[in-house]
Amino acid sequence: MSEDSIPDYTSVKDLGQLLGLLEGRDDVVRHLHRRLEEQVAEIENLQAVVNERDQALGNLQIVLNSRDETVSSLQNRLNEQTKTIFCLQAAAGDQDETVRDLQAALGERDQTVSNLQSAMAQKDATFSDLQAVLGGKDATVNDLEGSQKESGEINSQLRALLVEHDKTVVEFKVLLGARDRNVIRLQGASDRSDETISHLQDALEKKGDKITRLQSLLEAKDKDGESPEETISHLTAMNLVLEEKCERYKRAYVRLGEINSNYRCYDTTTPVSDEEKERLKTASDEMIEYLEASPEIYRMSKFWVQFFQYNMRQLNEVGLNNFKLTINQNYQNYIPADLDDPKLTALKDWFLNNPSLRPFLSAIENPDGLTDDGYLSEPGTSIFSDDPTKIALYRSMVTLGWEYCLQNDSLDLCARLEEPELGNPIRVHYDGKLISQDLATSAIEIMQMFRPTLEYLDGKPINVLEVGGGYGRLAHAVLSTLLVGKYIIVDVTPAIFVSQWYLENLFPAKKVWQFRPFTAWEEVEEEIKKADVIFLAPAQLELLPDNFVNLSVAISTLHEMRLEQANNYLREMARVSSQNVALKNYWSYENPYDGIVIRHEEYKYPDTLHQTVLENDPLNPVFFVEVFEQKDRPPDGALNCE
């Protein structure tokens, strides 16, 4: 309200007029008060707006700061993109050149298409010529239809000849059956042997027609100028020779039974002597004590602890004289279950590619029936359980393995090898001698693994180290056929005790150094250098001098250890070998006792070795055969054992 609007009370004439003016003033005051309250509310709202604006300005400042960082980052990326554009421009220049090359290539393609069109025109002309030729061919076909009638007559004559041929095969089969029965009677076998032949014939028929195979053989004889009658005569003569040999075997077994206790199988009335048990226990306790005092790397794996207990029990029950029927079955002497057994696959394939009647001319003594009052391997057990099929399969496998050796024997080993009676083997008679699965396996291993060293030495004596010698099967074959200076076996008990006994009895003229504890090479150097066959505990291997032998071998051994143990043996084998290292072990093997799986690719070979051979074992492809040579070999084969 302005000053001009304030009433002049001095000019008011009466009280009523004054009261009216006062009431009007009060209305003005109330109006002003409301206006004031509204302005205060507006000021408060403006303050809230100002606060919101300040908050928005703060947020905007943060956004601006972030934008500045983004702008800086974008500027950096822009710089990088600028560089990339320059590179792309350069590449575009190269691309333009490539386009020009492609255009030139397209021009050449157009020329090629033109050439092809010309060739097609020539082909159409050639096709017309061929149609003319086909017209002449139709006339030739008519001539051939006439000739076919004459061919039918010739086929009838051939079928008649085939019928006669089949009759000859049947007669030949009858003669073979008679020959088999004669052999069985001369061996003093039981009537169950007839069933053995029947089972074998059934098994062979499942894998192929036996008559067809015999026809192939007869046809081969015809090609050689020998008629079926001459073949039968030849086999009859062979049968007479076999009968004579069987008679000699019978007389020999009578003499063996009188003079050699090794000949008899285990008999409950003649248990293992307390003296033999004590010798085995003493020898084993001595080695166990030595092993426990050795570094961890040389102690027995859990696998071998289990086999130690199992082998010791068998030896205590049956004895050394029968170990080939007991602990030998824990090594590589396999009993096939049927014709599809993987261990027979390679031999079957080889036989089908090299058919012959020779493998059918062997004979086996059923060890389950050699004694009426005893057992075969240990009380309550047997090898074949008197199953004729198993016996026949085993005989076939052993004979085929030996035939394979004969066909591949470039070292002339087979003529000098025969399975020893010592240890009471499963007796398979063939070609005038006693053969075995172990004998064939050892011969093949020598051919594969020893050949490089033998060729390198060229007639000089070979010195061999074998890690894990088992009962001595490979050592027997090597010492029987090769010129050997020293043969060293590194093994644990009871295998080392068995191999010492076995090789000492087989080679009485050899000087044998039996295992005994020693801690320094100088303690035994002179004795070992004078010995022919040496037996060492694992930890003693590292005491041998460098280059002490020509060849180190390990067969079916490394996968029975922990991997660090196997690799340690590989280092030591390489160190003591001047020429070669040879291995035969599983490609992959699960060791349930140590809870590990060892594979070929996990072995670590020393850098001094150069691999020359890596292949499957020819008879059992679950094994690999690997041969190494030293990169720096002494030129004259000189050794530190001389």
Image (cartoon, helix red, strand yellow):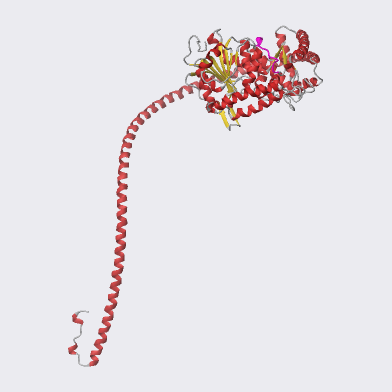
Q: Is residue 60 above or below residue 608?
A: below
Left/right placement of residue 197 relative to residue 524 reads right
Q: Residue furthest left?
A: 10
Magenta stretch bounds: 414-423
**Residue 211 on image: x %, y %:** 75, 17
How many numbered marks, from 0 up? Answer: 0
- Image quadrant holding the N terminus, namely bottom left
**Residue 430 on image: x %, y %:** 72, 13
Q: Nearest the camera: 603 or 202?
A: 603
Whether 420 is among the magenta residues is: yes
Q: Nearest the camera: 274 or 348?
A: 274
Q: Is residue 139 above or below residue 601?
A: above
Is residue 410 visible to us here? no
Q: Quadrant of residue 182?
A: top right
**Residue at 24 percent of width and 87 percent of height:** 21
**Residue 264 on image: x %, y %:** 75, 18
Whether 253 is among the magenta residues is: no
**Residue at 31 percent of width and 53 percent of height:** 62
Left/right placement of residue 499 relative to residue 381 reads left
**Residue at 45 percent of width and 23 percent of height:** 112
**Residue 163 on image: x %, y %:** 79, 15
Left/right placement of residue 587 relative to residue 230 reads left
Is residue 270 visible to us here? yes
Q: Nearest the camera: 109 or 361?
A: 361
Magenta: predominant secondary structure element? loop
Q: Is residue 525 above or below residue 345?
A: above
